[in-house]
Image (spheres, rainbow, N blue to C red):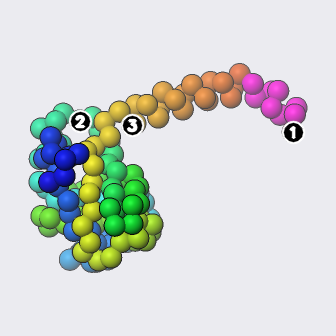
């Protein structure tokens, strides 16, 4: 268990591309930004009453690379997570390498939505000026 995640009951997982899943018919997962985690991860976040959608950051400590993702399903074998191949490559991972998913980012979606709305309102107020300046 990592110090950052100890209060959330999270731990490191062996990480594999989705193509390593027993059900290799999961091509839909490779095109998005969502991962597949074990049922125990759902148990951990359910006890915390974290609002959906669940957003995590995954860190590869060896390459010091981090990315953010959502969760598609909680059906992976215990101790494993499956991620899209593009994400696997971006994190510079090897098959079965341990990664550190950080606690769900509870306020990320709310913060993004309110920030996005603020900028959208400003854009709409100044859209005519922007069109004439092009």
Q: Residue 52: give x, y in percent of width and height.
A: 29, 39
Residue matched to label 1: 134
Residue 58 visible in image: yes
Residue at 27% x, 54% y is 101
| Relative to 115, 58 lies left or right | left
Q: Earlier in the sequence, mark 2 or mark 3?
A: 2
Q: How far apart are the alpha carbons under marks 2 and 3?
A: 11 Å
Q: Which residue is mark 3?
A: 108
Residue located 27% across and 34% down the image: 51
Secondary structure of the residue carrying numbered label 1: loop
Q: Nearer the viewer, mark 1 or mark 3?
A: 3
Q: Which residue is mark 2?
A: 50
Q: What span is in magenta?
A: 126-133
Q: Quadrant of residue 116?
A: top right
| Quadrant housing the N terminus | bottom left
Q: Quadrant of residue 130?
A: top right
Q: Is residue 28 visible in this depiction of the protein?
A: no
From the top left corner, tell me how far across and down residue 117 is, in percent: 54, 28
């Amino acid at each position: 268990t990592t110090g950052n995640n100890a209060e959330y009951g999270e731990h490191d997982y062996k990480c594999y591309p989705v193509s390593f899943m027993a059900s290799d018919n999961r091509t839909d997962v490779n095109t998005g930004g969502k991962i597949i985690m074990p049922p125990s991860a759902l148990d951990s976040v359910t006890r915390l009453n974290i609002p959906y959608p669940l957003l995590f950051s995954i860190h590869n400590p060896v390459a010091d690379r981090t990315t953010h993702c959502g969760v598609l399903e909680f059906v992976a074998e215990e101790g494993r997570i499956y991620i899209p191949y593009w994400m696997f490559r971006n994190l510079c991972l090897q098959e079965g390498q341990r990664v550190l998913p950080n606690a769900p980012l509870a306020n990320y979606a709310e913060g993004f939505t309110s920030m996005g709305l603020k900028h959208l309102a400003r854009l709409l107020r100044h859209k005519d000026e922007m069109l004439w300046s092009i």
